[in-house]
Image: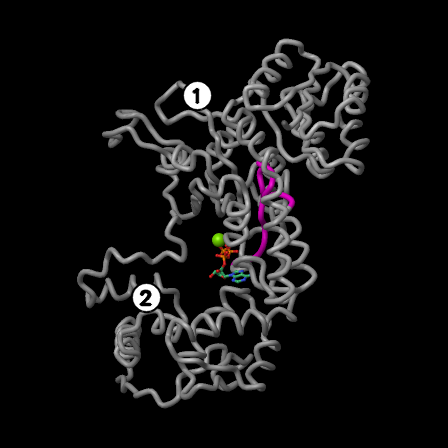
Amino acid sequence: MPHALVVDDEADSAEMLATLIALEGFTVASVGSLREARKQMILQQPDIMLLDLVLPDGSGMQLIEETRASCHMEIVLITGHASLETSIQAFRLGVTDYLVKPINMTQLQGILSRVTKPSRLHAEADDLQTQLDQEGHFGKLWGQSACMRRIYQQILRVSGTGVTVFITGESGTGKEVVASTVHELSRRRNRPFLAVNCGAISPHLIESEIFGHEKGSFTGAERQHQGFFERANGGTLFLDEITEMPLDLQVKLLRVLETGTFMRVGSTQAQEADVRLIAATNRPPMQAVKEGKLREDLLYRLNVFPIQLPTLRERPEDVPLIAQHFLSEISNREGQLKRFSPAACKQLQSHDWPGNVRELRNIVYRAYVMALDDTIVDACLPTPDEPLPVMSGAPTLTVRVGTPLAEIERMVTLATLEHLGRHKEKTAATLGVSLKTLYNRLKEYSTVPGDENESLEENPSHY
Ligand SMILES: Nc1ncnc2c1ncn2[C@@H]1O[C@H](COP(=O)(O)OP(=O)(O)OP(=O)(O)O)[C@@H](O)[C@H]1O
Ligand SMILES: [Mg+2]
């Protein structure tokens, strides 16, 4: 039977916690000071310690520092008194989770269930390490460079916990892939992963989209509506482009992080939020604070576990591996195997990838479409003079001088679509636009009746 130690000087709350833990099948010892905690640990080594930071004979931090090197127990902070700075420091020392008073039963059960199954994560970490050494990827993330290996270590460390993660990095560096990897490796993996782009939702609707609303709470609110916090219950909510969230809503988000509860628009009843939050931005966060786009107090709350993704320029050694991975993936999908010529490989490495991995993927796809046979030569790849080389052997169009640009765009788009057998992804790659942009254009030209409902997202759970 697993053993838990509760260290809390408030007798009532310690007793209640001990009872709840016992109900989950643990043996429990409960003490009210650092001195007693040390004694208890000698008597029986706990599998998990639930620790209040403010204790009569000192700070719980001391205990964390004393124990972290020597034993494998999980440490969960019971916050309430703890200042934010101390909590952040505690996470850096290896604390794996936190509970806010009053204790939320669902959250507690989640934490305890992880303690009873620690071996799963260890086995999984071993598999991922083997995959990384042999094939060059960590789940969906490709790259073997030292800086990516550090990222994988951070992902492994944080996914076993319930703490908030803050991912920063330029556009296309893989922030969303990292967020979903953290979710997949966490105990929440069988629950939803919802990705919300805060910049894509109208500022008027974003509060009710995130927190939900009650019937009649504003004009047009005809029914009660579940927000993302409710829909992600038990799972992970990924708030992308957090700096685009209106400032008054950032205050409300901060409150959720502090209290573990939220309210629907138009309701006064607080609901428990059993959601792991991951936020991301492609702006330097301190600069966003200075520009008044991100509240400083929210930044500190989010930044409990920061992950800063490297650009592709910082890891040029990963480019051939990732390019080859994308090429194999595309070859498999399209049914024709293609390879890079040695000169093409060299050229890929000399490009500086302002659009990071997303750009690399688009360029590989475009080169695949453009290659006349099964070898992708360097002429299919960008150079400083010609960022998007043109397809050789394609039919030409004649345009009269003075033709409106919009008309030229329409002609080229439709002609490329025909030339590529109406294959939309290939067409978008060749024209150097996103698939979504292509669909929008085609809709404008109204050439694709019935296509409006096709999913355009890279990820079907994306809002
Ligand atoms: N390390 C990687 N290995 C394989 N694919 C990756 C990697 N990083 C990113 N990608 C791919 O690149 C594309 C962009 O990734 P993602 O959407 O996660 O970037 P992002 O940092 O969220 O960008 P943005 O700031 O524009 O939202 C996706 O197709 C993703 O699958
Ligand atoms: Mg993103």
Residue 270 circle label: 1
Q: Is residue 48 left or right of residue 124?
A: right
Q: As rendered, which of 448 and 372 lies closer to the eye?
A: 372
User: What residue is rendered at 50% in x and 32% in y?
Assistant: 253
Residue 147 circle label: none
User: What is the three-letter code of the residue carrying label 2?
Assistant: Leu
Residue 236: % across, % down: 48, 40
User: What is the three-letter code of the residue carrying label 1?
Assistant: Ala
Q: Is residue 136 left or right of residue 272?
A: right
Is label 1 in a helix, a strand or a loop? Answer: loop
User: What residue is rendered at 63% in x and 41% in y?
Assistant: 305
Q: As rendered, which of 92 and 132 lies closer to the eye?
A: 132
Tell me, yes or no, whether the highlighted magenta stretch contains residue 333: no
Tell me, yes or no, whether the highlighted magenta stretch contains residue 163: yes
The answer to whether residue 403 shows anywhere in this view is no
Q: Is residue 312 above or below residue 384?
A: above
Q: Which residues are magenta?
A: 157-171
Q: Quadrant of residue 393?
A: bottom left
User: What residue is rendered at 50% in x and 49% in y?
Assistant: 180
Name the outermost residue toward the left. Answer: 449
Residue 372: % across, % down: 40, 88
Instruction: Confirm or reject: label 2 Cβ below 8 Å from ligand 1.
Output: no
Q: Is residue 342 above or below residue 7?
A: below
The answer to whether residue 341 shows anywhere in this view is yes
Reading the chain from its start, which is encountered first: label 1 or label 2? 1
Give the residue number, with chain letter if any, for mark 2: 438
